[in-house]
């Protein structure tokens, strides 16, 4: 899911992520499943959410997994 947002390099809605994920799946995911996962990833500071009208748009906090790991280490242990 995060890879879809990273690949887009833009803000995406839950529906856009759902559409992208379901293109390569035999059994489609449900909207609420993707929405719940994206809210969880927002709470974990992997995604950032912003409201645009009646929908939320999500973007990746870091450009890739390595950057995310480094930022978490720096937040936890400082820049020593």
Image: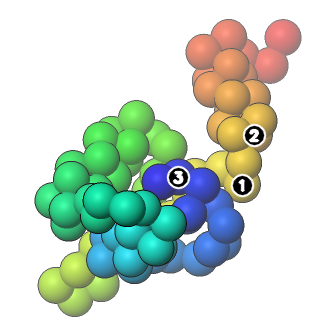
**Mark closer to the chain start, 3 or 1:** 3
- SS type, badge 3: helix
Q: In this view of the protein, which residue sits in the foreground, 29 or 56?
A: 29
Instruction: Report how far apart the C-alphas of labels 3 and 2 lie in the structure.
Output: 13 Å
Q: Position of residue 36 (x, y in %)?
A: 21, 50
**Mark closer to the chain start, 3 or 2:** 3
Q: Which residue is mark 2?
A: 67
Left of 17 or right of it: where is 74? right
Left of 44 or right of it: where is 33? left
Instruction: Report how far apart the C-alphas of labels 3 and 1 lie in the structure.
Output: 10 Å
Q: Quadrant of residue 75?
A: top right
Evaluate whether residue 42 shows in this view. yes
Left of 35 or right of it: where is 58? right
Q: Position of residue 71 (x, y in %)?
A: 69, 32
Q: Position of residue 42 (x, y in %)?
A: 37, 47
Q: Which is closer to the viewer, label 3 or label 1?
A: 3
Q: Are marks 2 and 1 in contact (CB under 8 Å)?
A: yes
Which residue is located at x 37 percent, y 62 percent?
Answer: 26
Instruction: Answer few, some or many: residues within 10 Å of disc 1's Cα (few below 14, many 20 plus, some between 14 and 19).
Output: some
Q: Which residue is mark 3?
A: 2
Q: Which residue is mark 1?
A: 63
Which residue is located at x 45 percent, y 41 percent?
Answer: 45
Instruction: Answer few, some or many: residues within 10 Å of disc 3's Cα (few below 14, many 20 plus, some between 14 and 19).
Output: some
């Amino acid at each position: 899911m995060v890879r879809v947002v990273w690949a887009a390099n833009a803000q995406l809605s839950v529906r856009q992520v759902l559409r992208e994920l379901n293109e390569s799946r035999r059994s489609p995911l449900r909207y609420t499943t993707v929405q719940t996962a994206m809210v969880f990833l927002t709470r974990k500071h992997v995604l950032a959410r912003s409201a645009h009208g009646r929908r939320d748009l999500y973007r990746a906090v870091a450009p890739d997994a390595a950057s995310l790991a480094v930022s978490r280490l720096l937040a936890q242990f400082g820049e020593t």
